Image (cartoon, helix red, strand yellow):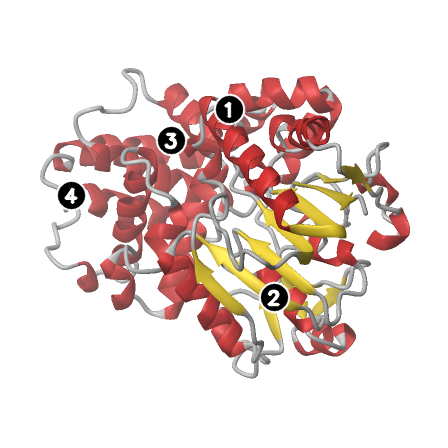
Amino acid sequence: MPAPRFAQASEVPGLAARRIAADILDGVLQKRRMLDDQLEGPAAHPGLKTLSDRDRALMRRLVATILRRLGTLEGLLAKLLDRGVPTDAPRAKSALLIGAAQILWMDVPDHAAVDLSVRLVQSDRRAAKYAGLVNAVLRRCAREGQPLVEELAAGTPDVPQWLLARWSEHYGAETTRAIAHAISHEPSLDLTVKSDPAHWAARLHGEVLPTGTVRTLLQGSVRMLPGFDEGQWWVQDAAAALPARLFGDIAGKSVADLCAAPGGKTAQLAAAGARVTAIDRSPARVARLRENLARLSLKVETGVADAAEWRGDATAEFDAVLIDAPCASTGTIRRHPDVAWLKQESDIGALAAVQNRLLKKAASLLRPGGTLVYCTCSLEPEEGEQAIAALLDAESSMRRQPIDPAEVAGLAEIVTTDGALRTLPCHLPHSDPRLAGLDGFYAARLVKSL
């Protein structure tokens, strides 16, 4: 007997979380909306406010799992559906993805995963006619899915082909496979602490990485964790915490932090005693930056401006400039799996032009003898190595200051032959894959001639 159709998600435990998950998936895959924008801020899904903390966490994990395994899931459905996924009812595809992800990778009983996906299509006018199909396909997935997933895994389906081709060319086939494996795992929570990492690792049931970052597997709202309200730490991937440290002792020095929001690196600079001017072009992102700095009790001068056009105080020159440039963000797919499906290869050229403008502006803001640190969370050479090479060709006053492995906890594998920083998602291995890995970052340090 088919399950009854429910008008209100609250009448069936767990259905509201899955309906919102389906809405957000549709936002990413059909409307090309960033996942973070749908989860937080003024454009967040309004239904999130109605969910319990537990259901909100379930919804987030469900969406992230599907996006992280999207290629595998689509390949699996192609094998289980004789005529392919229905194209006239997007909610039918979402329901199939949600059900299959729970069956294959989440601690949800198969019968519950099937039932709730059936209810999900029944509650949608266009998709209701596919309830029987969804039921049959997901029951078959529960019986036959795991061997099919293992068969599909040989082809690295969860990374778009254009990215695989680029990474294979730049890093080699073996490293590319290692990157793909690393980004298939849900990442840990990384925190930068103001002081005493060992204390906070103990409080938060985590461990201290060689670089000083505290890494924990705790889940749920970070606002509920010890030390949040007191401003003792902030969320920041271990790799993202490295570029700001490349300035060395920066206490008392003037620093321009361009493209600063949401402010993790800004907080590092201020906590180290620098006099920071933080600039970002987005008013909403600057508002978030100010909120974060207020919680951390850190004083920073902030401004809303296009950093490439920003004049600042026309008479001032900075001791240091940090550019965390807008980029394709392909190094962050392990934390932001929507990036793999939203970015296109054509984006890279346009972003590289922006990066070149920012680098030239940074050089003009720097006093003679001052230090520039440029970084991107991208694995693409146009946004890292090639951007720095272009600046050095154009600006004779700028020269490299190579990074020594001792400056990054002795991790020689993340320092390139020309003294730049290049972290990969497969770096920092661990026996527990949930505690392994880094975001992919490039960083270079330059000095302006006296």
Please state which amino acid type lies under the numbered disc 3: Arg
Number of other residues with Cα within 10 Å of mark 4, as a class: few under 14, some 14 to 19, many 20 or more: many
For marks 4 and 3, give the CA distance: 19 Å
Residue at x 58%, y 76% (from the top left corner)? 298
**Lateral position of residue 214 relative to residue 230, left or right:** right
Image location of residue 301, percent across then percent down = 52, 69
Q: Quadrant of residue 400?
A: top right
Please name whichever residue, 110 or 296, is drawn nearer the observer in this view of the structure.
Answer: 296
- Confirm whether residue 404 shows in the render: yes
Please state which amino acid type lies under the numbered disc 4: Gln
Residue carrying label 4 = 122
Residue at x 28%, y 24% (from the top left corner)? 85
Q: What element carries label 1?
A: helix
- Which is more foreground, mark 4 or mark 3? 4
For marks 4 and 1, give the CA distance: 44 Å
Residue carrying label 2 = 276
Whichever of labels 4 and 3 marks the residue nearer the N terminus, that label is: 4
Please state which amino acid type lies under the numbered disc 1: Gly
Q: In which quarter of the image is residue 277?
A: bottom right
Residue carrying label 1 = 349
Vertical comparison of 136 with 83: above or below: below
For marks 2 and 4, give the CA distance: 55 Å
Tag 1 near tag 3, CB within 8 Å:
no
- Which is more foreground, mark 4 or mark 1? 1
Q: What element carries label 3?
A: helix
For marks 1 and 3, give the CA distance: 44 Å
Tag 4 near tag 1, CB within 8 Å:
no
Whichever of labels 2 and 4 marks the residue nearer the N terminus, that label is: 4
Residue carrying label 3 = 140
Please state which amino acid type lies under the numbered disc 2: Val
Whichever of labels 2 and 1 marks the residue nearer the N terminus, that label is: 2
- Which is more foreground, mark 1 or mark 3? 1
